[in-house]
Image (spheres, grey):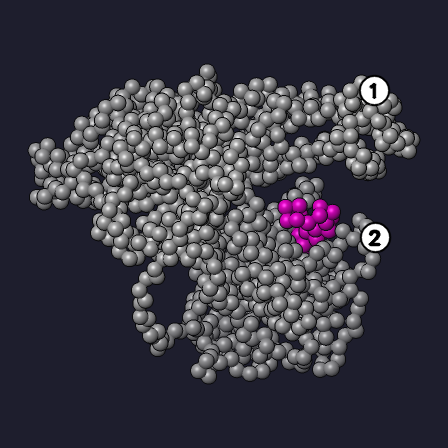
Amino acid sequence: MSSFEIMQAPATGAHLIDASAGTGKTYTISGLVVRMLVEYRHPIEEILVVTFTEAAASDLKARIREMIVEAGLAFAGGQAKDGFIASLTEAASDHPAASRLLNSALQNFDEAPIFTIHGFCQRVLQDNFLECGLLLDSELITDQQAFVREIAEDYFRKKLYKTSLLFATYCLNRLLPEQLKKFLGAYYARDDIRIIPEVDGQELQREIEAAENDFTGIYESTISQWLLVRDEVPGILLADEGLNRKKYPLKSIPGWILLLDRLAAGAVPNLDLFDNFHKFTLSSLRQSMNKGCSPPEHRFFSQCDDLMKSRDAVVDLYELYIISLKSELFRYVRRELVRGREEGGRHSFDDLLKDLFLALRGEGGEELAASVRAGYRVALIDEFQDTDPVQYEIFKTIFSGPESLLLMIGDPKQAIYSFRGADIFAYIKAVREVKSRFTLGHNWRSVPGLITATNAFFAKHPRPFLFSEIPFEDARWPVEKDHQHLLLDGRQEEPFQMMLLERLAGDNPDKLLGKEVARKRILTWLVGEITRLLGAGAEGRATIGGASLSAGDIAVLVRTNNEARQTQKALAEAGVASVLHSSESLFASREAEELLLTLKALADPGDNRTLRAALATRIFGLDGYQLDHLNGDGEELSTWIEKFRSYHTRWKEHGFGGMFAFLLAGERVRPRLLRLAGGERSVTNILHLHEILHLAAVERKLGITGLCKYLAEAISDTGQGVPEEYQLRLESDAALVQIVTIHKSKGLQYPVVFCPYCWEGSRLKEIRNNKMVAGSNGFLYHDRSRGFELIMDIGSADLAISREAAFAEELAENLRLLYVALTRAVQRCYLFWGPFNGAETSALAYLLHHRKGAMRDDCAPDSFAILQTLADSEIAADVVGLVAAAGENIRVRTLAEDAPAFPVKPPDSVPLRECPEFSGFIDSGWKISSFSSLADKLRVPYLRRGFPAAGFNLPETEDEQERLGGRDENLPGSIAARGIANEPGEAYAVFPGAPGDRDDGVQFYRDIRNFPKGPGAGTFLHTLLENLDFTLTDTGARESWVRKYLVAAGYAPEWSPAVDSMLTQVLHTPLPGGRQNMHLAEITRKDRLDELEFYFPLAGFDVDALAALLSEEFGIRKARSVTDSSGCPERVNGFMKGYVDLMFCHDGRFYIVDWKSNHLGYGREDYSRAVLDQVMVHEMYVLQSLIYTVALHRYLERRLPGYDYEKHFGGVYYLFLRGVGYDSGQHYGIYHDVPDVKVVLKAARLLAAGQG
């Protein structure tokens, strides 16, 4: 390959540029952009740059802009410091023109098309949505894992609910939705994947039915026989002298008999016979006899043989049927995702690629390609090794014109993202199709000795990256660069440190070291070496370029998140602080689990079990003693319940974000967590979760129940391919030891790098008798004979061959991972190796211990057994062989049992400044207010005239559900039992509560008053009404829709009659106060607004003045003044915010509806107007009604021409859903009021201007 130079880059055509580690790929792209601007005069808007992550795109934008600025200064008369810019200025004849072009590029830089691949596809589709046949307003979702999970669950239900009980039982631990989702992995969206073998599930079902019947008959016959011969068989097995007692131990036979008894006691046939059932078969007995002895004879043993054969026949058919189901699952997921896209307007990132690919392939594709090509003269594709076939075809199709320049820049040696769909074989295909190929050969990152050592490491093997299409060429270093070396006590040591573990005196010399033993010894040495370096740095004895080595200069590269946690823990125990860079999901953290427990308790504060679980988390920090103390201290428990209820109320009023911020401050969560080990990590995760959940609640409009469900599902969905926004963030910006996964480290560099776990081998599951073992999802590989077609083998006759092909691809990626790890270091790299169990299939074993003839070209797994045969001295000899090839730049260090540890010198103490005192004023009166916040101010001070304060405890209302957590223990019966009296001392009788007997079966589920209570029920009923088409006349369709919503909300579908009956009453009961027989069933979608949000400004109104208005108009007497901290009457500034459940228009009049899911009792009279009048006053709903009326009045006053309150406002309805009805001329469950216009105007002036 030719060496690539920016100044000699071709102007047209398609070209590949191999950019090895540290060779300046980003610099090259930036230089190409500047050259295209100056030399070819392409506008910045016509130079397309595509990369693969948002972070990379941001970095490219910054670097390109910097180089444009630097070049602009050089052309304006400054001196070029950069060699390329100097060459460019020297070659350009018209410097003023070049300067103008560069300035123009800077002015229009916001229009620079620097995209991620998905961003590019989205832009093309948006600009050409008609040509692509797409909707303009499609919703783009960044993560469709939740939809995939739902589809997998739906598929599971559809398939298993129609099968036999025998098959369903067999699949319990083999075909669960979680396993199906894991099986789909990152490849469910790949249309080019082929599943083998192809099995006809329909044809199999007939065979399965016959085999099941045969098995069931033999099973029942066997059990019947056992019951008849139960006393005979044990004696035969115990007494036969010819049986080999190693295979049939006397002490084991009674246990087998017991297991057989338990099997016989089972209610239904079961394929999972116990492990030693075969001991009762004649075939097993024949194989277990001593020489010359005949097996004992009994018809039961032959019967067990028949049962085993029948069982194996069924299992074989089941396994084939499972294969057909898994294969069909891929097709089903694709169909459902397409349906969701077409019906719901939902598009994922994968859909963007597919849509553009299909548009380019379809009718008008050539015109579309030409149109896009006309907009971009140049296309620079960064990280090209991470493309997949679809992406490559898009680039190739669009930029294949003779006037276009397509530069595909990447390094196949660093293609390490197959788990998220990247495909090295797309790069290999490009290598075969694109004839022009260049390389960037100078490593600007590492010191020369480290470059030489790395060259020797990979050059040792004839095929260091396994595939011939990925060659290795020695990297070179620029002679003009002034390299800075790591010096210890003024001496430069070997930059590549090979840490070799040997078996110790107590280890078996013929066995490899166990993984855990190896990890423990490696960690001991790693911590010791890091503390040694840091100690030397603290004393000024370890320096780089004259600066002391610090913790931030050191990185530990790991493969897995578990390795990262173990390493961080080991460093912490030695007093070394570190920071974790990981792609691990935030939702896999302990903090996510604890926050879920907290949210559940906040959703239902009266549930002692969930409350205690939350208090036991580190968020609240109660220890075992404190939790136990709650059992005997009812007052303290009540205090916690009330506190959680207040948080619950705040959640409803201010949303999750505001509530949780208040909780964090009120419970002093941050200071407490920071005192714990790993506290920074915990605080970072908590704050990150806070942000993610707040966004989810806002964007998805999730209430309390919905957000709890969202978090629970996110926790269950953690796995590979975690979206970047859900990955763990850095817990500290301090210069600490960096612990980084190799995948995260790509593109980064560190002065000193430790690679302690690069010896891990293959993770592929084994196969037995050409069948997959439990937990295996098949073997994925590319078929070279079919143009690198992607194959998923889940049980073909060639399973062993498929496994070898999959292993070869896994090994090839592990070799690339090793390359990425070793090339992150600038001054020094540590690599650990030794005779470790599992390492025989590793990339290191492949590179270090290759023997001519010992490893087959097909790289079968058994070809790596050579490591097991090598003595420590032979392993060391192979490693030492590298030293000569590396020119003494590698040092091999044999690790003794205990590594030396050096205490890290603490930094010099820094004098603390005295904490200043805040003397300013914060106006706490300016806020966003709501009905609930005002009601809280007025609820205690202001009481209805003639009603006692003591003992008053209204039943749960919707807002009380939100505030009190939906507990119903204090609701034994009707509202009259609450102690509400017409006059002081006069109380109603207490009526019985819920029916004491639920044996009335179906009838119980027909009464909405029996429907579960609590915040979940209120949320469900609100959501139901919000999404219901009131005019729907097909009652069957509505009932089906209701059942679907019930199941989705976690309620039994048996509640459907009750809910449907409630809807009928709500929709068809005539509403008082409107046109005669007006009912909601008349209201169409275009005449209603659901969950209408409003804001209106407040002008410092006096809370006492509002109280006076309520007292005057609604008979609520004033108990005391509401004052602020200075003793002055409290005034409220800011905005009033709220949500109106429903606003509708009928016959030119506007109405407000508020749904109430309150449980007021089980009798009709519990929902009479007289009772509702009391509820409206005592729960301050009259205030809520007035606020809603003012909000609508102000809105209509500004938006409706000729608006007149008395003409256009029809009033407010409060519908208490459990009691709505009409009988004998009287309404039940319906409160209607049209506030007097004078009251409304007075309230509007009061709120807006601060005066009545």
Relative image position of residue 1034 (x, y in whole percent): 68, 41
Relative image position of residue 467 (x, y in whole percent): 39, 23
Say whether residue 232 is left or right of residue 1085.
right
- Residue type beneath disc 2: Asp
**Tags 2 and 1 touching, CB below 8 Å:** no
Q: Which mark is residue 303?
A: none
Relative image position of residue 1018 (x, y in whole percent): 63, 57
Q: Is 1059 a magenta residue? A: yes
1122 versus 514 height, above or below: below
**Rendering quarter of residue 1118:** bottom right
Taking the spot 37% from the left edge, 43% from the top edge, the residue there is 754
Q: Which residue is mark 1?
A: 294
Relative to the observer, which residue lies in front, 697 or 137? 697
Q: Which residue is mark 2?
A: 1000
Say whether residue 18 is left or right of residue 1045.
left
Relative to the observer, which residue lies in front, 512 or 794? 512
Taking the spot 42% from the left edge, 37% from the top edge, the residue there is 833
**Rendering quarter of residue 354:** top left
The magenta segment:
1046-1073
The numbered mark, 2 or 1, whose residue comes first in the sequence reads: 1
Q: What's the CA distance linking mark 2 and mark 1?
A: 65 Å
Taking the spot 83% from the left edge, 52% from the top edge, the residue there is 1000
595 versus 118 height, above or below: below
Q: Secondary structure at mark 2?
A: loop
- Residue type beneath disc 1: Ser
Taking the spot 74% from the left edge, 64% from the top edge, the residue there is 1161
Query: Does residue 677 show up?
Result: yes
Say whether residue 815 is left or right of residue 1122.
left
Q: Main secondary structure of the magenta part?
A: helix
Q: Secondary structure at mark 1?
A: loop
Question: How many numbered circles are shown?
Answer: 2
